[in-house]
Amino acid sequence: MEVLDTAALLTWPLEMLVGGVCASSQLSEVERLSPARHLLIEAQGPEFVTPSPSAIELAKEISQRTGDYSGLSNVDLEVLALALSRSLPLVTDDYRMQNVCESINHPWRGVIQDGVKEVRTHVLVCTGCGLIHTQGEVCPDCGSALKLKSEKTN
């Protein structure tokens, strides 16, 4: 069993999706992107589950440590939460989710792409005052734009 990101739901043949686990919130994402694919997946695809609030909180905490939290959607957090709470490999092409998994040695693999080669830490730095923030586009202190800065961890 593996937790499948939306990229797998949209690109893999249906038979490869059977036995996978996905966040319930992914159904609306797939429906928005491909209504026809949504019907097929809902009829014969993976198991859809809603992660617990504590699992989502864990995914949030770990992604904040790497600085990836600001770039993850709610659906991304739920997919990540399922993989972490069920101790299942995550299948994703999302570099931020791969980076979070890599940072804690959680198994993952790409859907189509190879994926990250090294763990990076991301921070949002204010272009005006230089303060570091965890989210947003504008510095709440001085009003300048925030810029993402990335550094190798190891």
Image (cartoon, grey):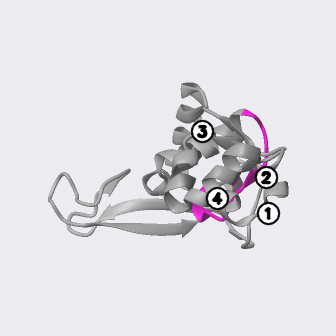
Neighbour tally class for label 2: few under 14, some 14-19, many 20 plus, Cα within 10 Å: many
Q: Is residue 118 left or right of residue 29?
A: right
At label 1, the amino acid type is: Pro
Query: Which is nearer the N-term, disc 3 or disc 1?
Result: 1
Q: Mark 4 or 1 closer to N-term?
A: 1
The residue under label 4 is: 37
* CB atoms of marks 4 and 1 within 8 Å: no
Would you say the residues marked 1 and 2 are in contact, meaning their CB atoms lie under 8 Å apart?
yes
Question: For this rendering, which residue is in front, 136 or 151?
Answer: 136
Image-quadrant location for residue 118: bottom right
Q: How many marks?
A: 4
Of callouts 2 and 3, the N-terminal one: 2
Q: CA distance from mark 3 to mark 1?
A: 20 Å
Specify whether 119 is left or right of 57. right
- Circle 2/circle 3 CB separation < 8 Å: no
Task: Check residue 13 in the rendering and tell me which mark sits there, or answer none.
Answer: 1
Residue ID for mark 3: 24
User: Which quarter of the picture shows residue 132?
Assistant: bottom left
Residue at position x 77%, y 46% from top? 44
The tag on residue 17 is 2
Q: Quick one: label 3 or label 4, which is nearer the N terminus?
A: 3
Marks 3 and 4, how far apart at CA? 15 Å
Can residue 1 be seen from the camera position used here? yes
Residue stretch in magenta: 86-101
